[in-house]
Amino acid sequence: MELAGTFGILQQNLLSPLTLAFLLGMLATLVKSDVEFPEPAYKFIAFYLMFAIGLNGGVELAGTTFAAFALPALATIFLAFLLPSLCYVVLRAIFRFDVANAAGVAALYGSVSSVTFAAGIGVVEAAGMGYEGFIPTMAALAEWGMIVALFWGRLGLKSRGDAIGKVVQETLTGRSVILLMGGLVIGALIGEPGFERIAVVFSQGPEGLFRGVLVLFLVEMGMVAARQLREFARVGPRMLVFGTMMPVLMGLLGATLGSLAGLSVGGAFILAAIAGSASYIDAPAAVRTTFPQANPSIYLTSSLGITLPFNLLLGLPLLYAYTQWFCDQLARCPVLPPGA
Amino acid sequence: MGPTTVTLLTIIAEGLLRERLIDDVMRLGASGYTLSEVHGRGTRGIAGQFWHGAQVRIEALVGTATADSILAHLETHYFADYSVIAYTTEVRVLRPDKYT
């Protein structure tokens, strides 16, 4: 991998509207500005982004064979099991966390950050590449990682009860899964002709609103991340190590397995973004319900205050460079044109 | 008949507990409740974590026995792990039968 190449990607990423918007949000909070993102707007935009990703994926699903889909899906399911388990073991053995806190952090890192996922899609689009239409399915499958972590925690605490069943149901019917999968089905049903008429709102391409809305959303995410960062003192430097090393490791595993499973460069990179990201919206609520004794400061600060900014600023470009290198040298993955 | 004294029970909790607390309050004998979203800070820091919006305040007018059983329930199920405070005050109302 050429150093100059990686540096170029880093620089390009730092100057992308997504990253700049995120930094603006962080700055606004750090200088205690009165910039405010109304909560209903936040919820609406999160809704829009997930639904749009599903729709775009669904439209591009046409022509996908089961054979092309099966291996990447299998790789994702394997990652959903491996990544939270790895986090749990690392936190217990190396970081000496108690069961509840280890399982709590692992649950967040085992599930998917919609923002990082969407930013990954943004990076691929900006690079003038396409990705497989079924990628949103991978994001939905990866959400199961959260349940694996909660399961380890329950096992570790030897606690019984029906909460896990409830969490499984809530994961299956959670907003991101319903919107992604629902959008995917609708997109597949309406196809290209139907989508053309709503493309002005939903398209991820240059003719649609998606990119601009994502930029707006990242201002808010920057503010949220910076607010959470204030808790950093209570969490300590050990989470800085975990919150930056772990996403890289998980992302590398995602890119590697994705490439070997036959994904394109764009698809393998987005799978890396899915694998390397940590959730901070749906998973914390599930953790709070299942392990109320775990400290929210630890898992939220790590995921939201450390890993999210790290991924957006450094993690994604790093994973992108790695995916390109791995695909070039070893896996020979195809490069899809945009909107393929 | 003039105003009679009943108990006003107030619970302020993190937003995550909204549905569970409403269930509990009704199940333990309240005839109704008023819910509002509030913002504040307590010993656990800012409890209204952003993904669940604000904290909730649940108010119910109840008899003393019901108030006590709800308080006892909160103590055994929530006080240890969640951000919850609860208190009672005596208030005077007309139509006490509506509440107790």
Image (cartoon, grey):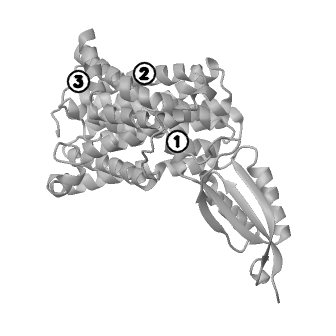
Residue toward you, A272 or A61: A272
Between circles 1 and 3, the one closer to the viewer is 1
Q: Amino acid at mark 1?
A: Ala
Pointer 2 residue? A248
Q: Is residue A322 visible?
A: yes
Pointer 3 residue? A333
**Alpha carbon separation for disc pair 2 and 3:** 21 Å
Are callouts 2 and 3 both on one chain? yes
Q: Where is residue A44, by image quadrant?
A: bottom left
* Rendered image: mark on residue A283: 1
Which quarter of the image is occupied by the N terminus of chain A? top left
Are callouts 1 and 2 both on one chain? yes
Up-down relation of residue A166 to residue A95 (above or below): below
Disc 2 chain ID: A
Disc 3 chain ID: A
Q: Amino acid at mark 2?
A: Val
Which quarter of the image is occupied by the C terminus of chain A? top left
Measured as percent of width and height from the top left, residue B8 is found at: 76, 68
**Alpha carbon separation for disc pair 1 and 2:** 20 Å
